[in-house]
C-alpha cells in the first residue's frame, strides 16, 4: 500500500456534504495533484442517522465522537465545517497541538480566538488553513497571506456578506423596505431562519477581523471591529442615495495608517455606507462578495465571486486540503500567522469619512443657520444641503466633507437637542468618493 492522506471530516451539512461530493468526484485528479490519494477516515456529525440523500460516503464512517475521531492515529488532516466556538475550538486545538494539519471555514472562531488556534499550530508544527472562512469561493486569504507578502497593504474594502448584499441590492432595485427585502431573501434561501448574524453585521465583522489580521500582520479580533448592521437602512435612505448617484452597501473597511497621535495603527469597521454608482463595489449585486485591496506597490486589486453556498465554499476547503496534504507529504508546514507588526487598534472616533444626515426640521427663518452652526462648532464642513418643504416642516439632507467620526457623533448629539430639529431620520457614512 502506498502513501495516503486521511481526513477527519467534522461536519457534513451545507459545506461538509459538498466537500464529500467533491472529494469523491475529483478523487483521481486530487490524488494526482497531491501525489497520494485522499481518503475520508471518519465523519463527525450531530445526528449520524439523519438521511443524507445519495451522499457518496460509507454510512459506517459517521460518528458523534468528533474528539475521538480527531485523536485517531490514522488521521492526518482535520477538516472542521461545523461552526461555532465550542466544541470546534477544542477539536482544532487538539488536532494542531498533536501535529495534525487543520482546514476550517469557521470565521466566528477565527475572529473570536484565532490566536489560540495559531499558537496551537505553531506548537504542533502543523498547518492551519482557512480560505473558506472569508468570501466563500473567492481566493482571497492566500493572496493576502502569500502573494502580497512582499508589499504593504494599506486598505481593504469589501462586501463580505452575501445575505445583506442580496437584501440591499433588492432594496435598490425595487424600492422595497428592509423587512420586505429580508422576507424575499428568506424565501429564496439566502437568509437563515435566524438572520441576526448577517443583518446585524456580526458575520461581516468576523470576516473583517480575519482580513485585517492577514493584511496588516497583527492580531485583530471580532471585538476590535466597530460593527453596525443594516436593519435601520430604510427605503427613504436608499431613495436618497439614488438621488445622489449612490447606492448603499454593507461595507467592511480595514485601514492601516497613522492615528491621531501619529503612531501607526489599524482601524476596522463594518457598517452600511453610501457609495457612488461608479465605484467598482456598487455593481456587486445579488449575494455576491467582492473585496478591494489597496497596496503600496501593487496598487488596487479586486477579488469577486460567490461568497457563500455549499459548493463554492467547498471549493475553497478543497483547495486548502490539497495544500496541506502536499505539505504533509513533503514533511513541511506553512506558518499560519504573521503578527509581528502588533499594531494598536484605532478607536472608531478617529475614523475619517463623509456623512449623509437626513433630518426633519421646522421650516422658518434661521433654522438652516442654527443647524449649520452646530456643524461649524464641531468643525464638520458641509458639502451640500438639500431642502424639501412640507407645510410647517422641512426635510433637510446634509452631506459633509471628510470629518472624524467623533466630531460627527458630537454634531448629531447636539442637533438632537436643538428645538427646531423634529427628528434625525438617518445618519449614513459616504465612502468611495472625493
Ligand atoms: P450546517 O449547519 O449546514 O452544518 C453543520 C454540520 O455540523 C452538520 O453536519 C451537523 O451535524 C454538524 N454538527 C453540528 N454540531 C455538531 C457537534 N456538536 N458535533 C458534531 N457535528 C456537529 O453548517 P454549514 O455547512 O453551513 O457551515 C459550516 C461552517 O462553514 C461554519 O463555520 C460556517 O460559518 C462556515 N461557512 C459556511 C458557508 C455557507 O455558505 N454555508 C460559507 C462560508 C463559511 P448534522 O448534519 O447531524 O446536523
Ligand atoms: N451568511 C453568510 C453570508 C454565509 O450571507 O455571506 C457566508 O459566510
Image: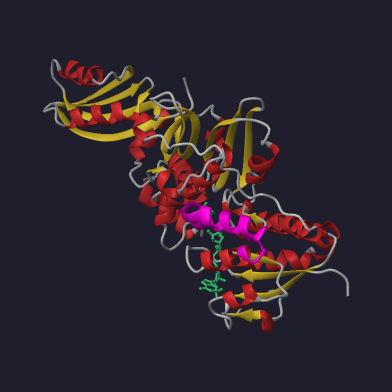
User: Is 113 colored magenta in this rendering?
Assistant: yes
Where residue 188 appears, as percent x and y from the top left, is: 51, 58
Where residue 369 appears, as percent x and y from the top left, is: 19, 15
Locate residue 330: give its quadrant: bottom right
**Residue at left offset 70%, top offset 72%:** 75
Q: Give the range drawn in magenta.
A: 97-125
Is residue 2 left or right of 117 when viewed as pictured?
right
Locate residue 242: give its quadrant: top left
Is residue 172 left or right of 412 when viewed as pictured?
right
In front: 237, or 270?
270
**Residue at left offset 53%, top offset 39%:** 158
**Residue at left offset 21%, top offset 32%:** 413
Does 422 sit above or below residue 315?
above
In front: 334, or 381?
334
User: Is 98 colored magenta in this rendering?
Assistant: yes
Is residue 198 left or right of 380 when viewed as pictured?
right
**Residue at left offset 79%, top offset 63%:** 26
Amino acid at each position: 500500500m502506498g502513501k495516503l492522506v486521511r481526513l477527519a471530516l467534522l461536519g457534513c451539512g451545507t459545506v461538509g456534504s459538498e466537500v464529500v461530493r467533491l472529494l469523491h468526484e475529483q478523487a483521481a485528479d486530487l490524488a494526482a495533484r497531491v501525489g497520494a490519494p485522499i481518503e475520508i477516515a471518519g465523519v463527525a456529525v450531530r445526528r449520524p442517522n439523519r438521511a443524507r440523500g445519495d451522499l457518496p460516503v460509507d454510512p459506517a464512517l459517521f460518528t458523534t465522537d468528533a474528539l475521538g475521531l480527531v485523536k485517531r492515529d490514522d488521521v492526518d488532516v482535520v477538516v472542521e465545517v461545523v461552526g461555532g466556538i465550542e466544541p470546534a475550538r477544542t477539536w482544532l486545538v487538539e488536532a494542531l497541538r498533536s501535529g495534525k494539519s487543520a482546514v476550517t471555514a469557521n470565521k466566528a472562531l477565527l475572529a473570536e480566538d484565532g490566536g489560540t488556534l495559531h499558537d496551537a499550530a505553531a506548537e504542533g508544527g502543523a498547518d492551519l488553513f482557512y480560505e473558506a472562512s472569508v468570501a466563500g469561493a473567492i481566493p482571497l486569504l492566500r493572496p493576502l497571506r502569500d502573494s502580497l507578502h512582499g508589499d504593504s497593504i494599506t486598505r481593504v474594502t469589501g462586501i463580505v456578506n452575501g445575505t445583506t448584499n442580496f437584501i440591499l441590492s433588492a432594496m435598490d432595485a425595487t424600492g422595497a423596505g428592509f423587512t420586505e427585502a429580508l422576507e424575499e431573501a428568506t424565501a429564496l434561501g439566502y437568509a437563515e431562519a435566524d438572520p441576526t448574524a448577517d443583518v446585524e453585521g456580526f458575520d461581516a465583522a468576523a470576516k473583517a477581523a480575519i482580513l485585517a489580521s492577514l493584511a496588516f500582520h497583527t492580531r485583530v479580533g471580532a471585538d476590535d471591529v466597530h460593527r453596525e448592521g443594516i436593519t435601520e437602512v430604510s427605503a427613504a435612505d436608499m431613495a436618497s442615495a439614488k438621488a445622489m448617484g449612490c447606492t448603499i452597501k454593507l461595507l467592511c473597511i480595514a485601514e492601516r495608517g497613522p492615528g491621531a497621535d501619529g503612531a501607526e495603527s489599524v482601524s476596522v469597521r463594518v457598517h452600511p455606507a453610501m457609495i457612488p454608482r461608479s465605484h467598482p463595489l456598487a455593481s456587486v449585486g445579488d449575494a455576491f462578495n467582492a473585496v478591494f485591496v489597496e497596496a503600496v506597490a501593487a496598487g488596487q486589486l479586486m477579488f469577486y465571486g460567490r461568497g457563500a453556498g455549499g459548493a463554492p465554499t467547498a471549493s475553497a476547503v478543497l483547495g486548502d486540503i490539497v495544500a496541506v496534504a502536499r505539505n504533509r507529504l513533503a514533511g513541511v508546514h506553512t506558518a499560519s500567522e504573521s503578527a509581528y507588526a502588533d499594531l494598536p487598534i484605532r478607536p472608531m472616533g478617529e475614523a475619517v469619512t463623509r456623512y449623509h444626515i437626513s433630518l426633519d426640521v421646522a421650516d422658518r427663518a434661521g433654522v438652516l443657520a442654527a443647524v449649520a452652526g452646530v456643524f461649524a462648532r464641531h468643525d464638520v464642513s458641509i458639502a451640500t444641503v438639500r431642502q424639501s418643504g412640507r407645510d410647517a416642516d422641512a426635510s433637510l439632507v446634509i452631506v459633509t466633507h471628510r470629518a472624524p467620526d467623533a466630531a460627527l457623533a458630537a454634531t448629531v448629539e447636539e442637533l438632537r437637542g436643538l428645538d427646531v430639529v423634529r427628528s434625525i431620520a438617518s445618519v449614513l457614512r459616504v465612502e468611495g468618493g472625493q
